[in-house]
Amino acid sequence: MEKQEMVEKTVEVLRPLETQNLMTTIQNLTLQQIFSNWVFLLVTLGILFFGVYKRSKTVLLTLFFLLALIVMVKFAMPAPGQELTMKSILPFIAFGLGIGGVIVYFMFVKD
């Protein structure tokens, strides 16, 4: 019986981390909520400081990618309950090409 109770507690603890719950949470967040969260700001500043201190293009480009990904998900994801259509996929394509272009430029062309 102990194992079954432990499994049930674990399932309840991990339920908010299911993909559907995470996507719903991300879609309902505003950019102001994301960028005013002290944990997010602390982690971002830590990564930025580390990237500047080590002069690492890889770390700084990873930080750029993560911030661009947050903005892309916020602006390009359809509202909850709507399907992905060809018109709603176009911002994903544009953001993806933009992010990829910046990363390729700084990693290969500018070097």
Image (spheres, rainbow, N blue to C red):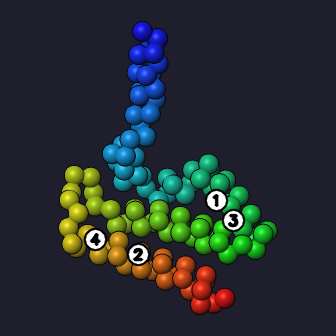
Q: Residue placed at 34% from the left, 67% from the top? A: 76
- Closer to us: 9 or 45: 9
Residues marked 1 and 4 touching at CB (< 8 Å): no
Residue position for label 1 = 44
Q: Name the disc covering residue 89, or none.
A: 4
Q: Residues within 10 Å of mark 3 (few under 14, many from 20)?
A: some
Looking at the rendered image, the quarter that the C terminus falls into is bottom right
Q: Indicate left or right for 53 with 20 as reference.
A: right
Query: Pointers 2 and 3 in contact (CB under 8 A)?
Result: no
The answer to whether the residues at label 3 and label 1 have Cβ atoms under 8 Å apart is yes
Q: Is residue 4 left or right of residue 35?
A: left
Q: Name the residue rendered at 37%, 78% in the picture.
A: 94
- Mark 4 burial class by Cα count in 10 Å: few <14, some 14-19, many 20+: few
Image quarter where the N terminus lies is top left
Is the residue marked by circle 2 packed among few (<14), some (14-19), or many (20+) residues within 10 Å? some
Q: Position of residue 91 (x, y in %)?
A: 33, 74
Which type of secondary structure does the marked residue at label 4 adopt? helix
**Gap between marks 1 and 4 measured at Cα:** 28 Å
Image coordinates of residue 51 in percent, x first then y, are: 72, 68
Residue kind at label 2, given as amino acid type: Phe
Residue at label 3? Answer: 48
**Secondary element at image label 3:** helix
Q: Which residue is mark 2?
A: 95
Q: Amino acid at mark 4?
A: Ile
Q: For marks 2 and 1, give the CA distance.
A: 21 Å
Give, as a three-letter code, the residue at label 3.
Answer: Leu
Dot placed on the residue nearer the N-terminal end, 2 or 3: 3
